[in-house]
Image: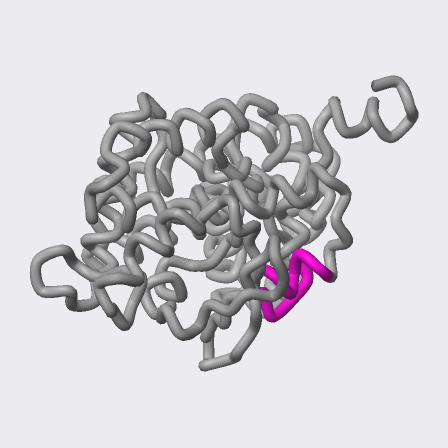
């Protein structure tokens, strides 16, 4: 007599789990596998009198994965991984089944995390903390570095390698800064003189090579040192956000909000592919309202 769908699932589940145990998978892993396969069994009860094991297709697979809308994408992806392994195991044991090809292209799209950046008020607060010590070497250097990060979007590694000789005056209002990016690819970024001229003039008297130089030996600042400085300044400005890259995001999102062409943003950011630039172009409600002329 032909075995039922659930009998077959139960049979293969036991053999599959026993194989995992024999391969010394952890108890936690075994528990997760059992939980997902038990959930599959319960789900397939509705199909017991309608289909055979060989009839399980992509539609049924996806119906199980998406049946609980409260599951996170990472949990769904775990279910996909476990089930792909399970059905692959069945096919390898019994060549009558062809699950591997059927399920090969099933993937759960990763949820795109929102890009964290500073808002206008946070930028003002961050820069305002430097007003107390206008004649301090550290304060002038730190404001210069943070301003370049915010208003040009350069990477931390790129900032650390900027030399004073890389900065030229384009006209009365703008500095042009030579950047050596990834793969030693050269590009230029631009910044308004009123953002950094005071700090730049102050530091020039020390005859330094790099903008990011320590105050004791005037050697090049390290990435760790730069990160610590930015973290310290953000904390002083009461900004509950961290990381140097957040300042790069701030620059990119600012350009997007001003409707700057994505190709231009790509070049300024030093992205190799415009797809990378596209992550900043996600519309929010205010931009959509503005687009239809209501704001």
Q: Residue at x 60, y 51 (%)?
A: 107
Measuring 47% from the left and 56% from the top, which residue is drawn there? 85
Front-most of residues 22 and 218: 218
Q: Residue at x 47, y 53 (%)?
A: 86
Does residue 98 sit above or below 34 in this rendering? below
Rendering coords of residue 286 (x, y %)? 74, 23
Image coords of residue 179 (percent x, y): 48, 71
Picture layout, residue 218 above or below residue 136? below
Quadrant position of residue 171? bottom right
Is 222 left, or right, of 210 in this rendering?
A: left
Which of the two residues, 119 or 1, is positioned nearer the viewer here? 119
Magenta stretch: give its range: 264-275
Rendered position, 69 above or below 228: above
Q: Main secondary structure of the magenta part?
A: helix
Camera sees residue 11: no
Q: Nearer the viewer, residue 190 or 263?
A: 190
Measuring from the top left, give residue 19's x and y in whole percent: 30, 57
Residue with the most extreme bottom position? 184
Is residue 141 at all visible to an observer of this figure?
A: yes
User: What is the image's colouring?
Assistant: one colour
Report the residue that reaches farthest toward the top: 294
Is residue 220 left or right of 181 when viewed as pictured?
Answer: left
């Amino acid at each position: 007599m032909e075995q039922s769908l659930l009998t077959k699932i139960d049979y293969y589940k036991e053999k599959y789990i026993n194989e995992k145990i024999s391969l010394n998978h952890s108890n936690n892993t075994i528990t997760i596998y059992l939980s997902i396969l038990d959930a599959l069994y319960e789900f397939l009860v509705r199909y017991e009198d309608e289909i055979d094991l060989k009839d399980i297709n992509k539609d049924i697979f996806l119906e199980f994965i998406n049946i609980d809308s409260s599951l996170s994408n990472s949990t769904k992806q775990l279910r996909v991984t476990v089930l792909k392994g399970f059905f692959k195991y069945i096919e390898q044991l019994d060549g009558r089944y062809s699950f591997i090809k059927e399920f090969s292209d099933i993937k759960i799209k990763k949820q795109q995390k929102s890009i964290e950046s500073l808002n206008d008020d946070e930028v003002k607060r961050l820069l305002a903390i430097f007003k107390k010590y206008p004649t301090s070497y550290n304060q002038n250097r730190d404001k210069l570095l943070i301003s370049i990060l915010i208003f040009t979007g350069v990477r931390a590694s790129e900032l650390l390698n900027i030399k004073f000789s890389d900065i030229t005056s384009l006209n009365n209002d703008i500095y042009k800064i030579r950047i050596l990016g990834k793969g030693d690819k050269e590009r230029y970024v631009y910044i308004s003189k009123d953002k950094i001229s005071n700090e730049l003039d102050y530091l020039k008297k020390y005859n330094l090579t790099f903008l990011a130089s320590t105050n004791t030996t005037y050697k090049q600042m390290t990435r760790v040192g730069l990160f610590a400085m930015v973290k310290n300044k953000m904390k002083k400005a009461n900004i509950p956000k961290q990381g140097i890259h957040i300042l790069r995001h701030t620059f990119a999102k600012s350009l997007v909000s001003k409707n700057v062409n994505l190709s231009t943003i790509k070049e300024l950011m030093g992205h190799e592919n415009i797809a990378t630039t596209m992550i900043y172009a996600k519309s929010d409600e205010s931009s959509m309202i503005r687009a239809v002329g209501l704001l």
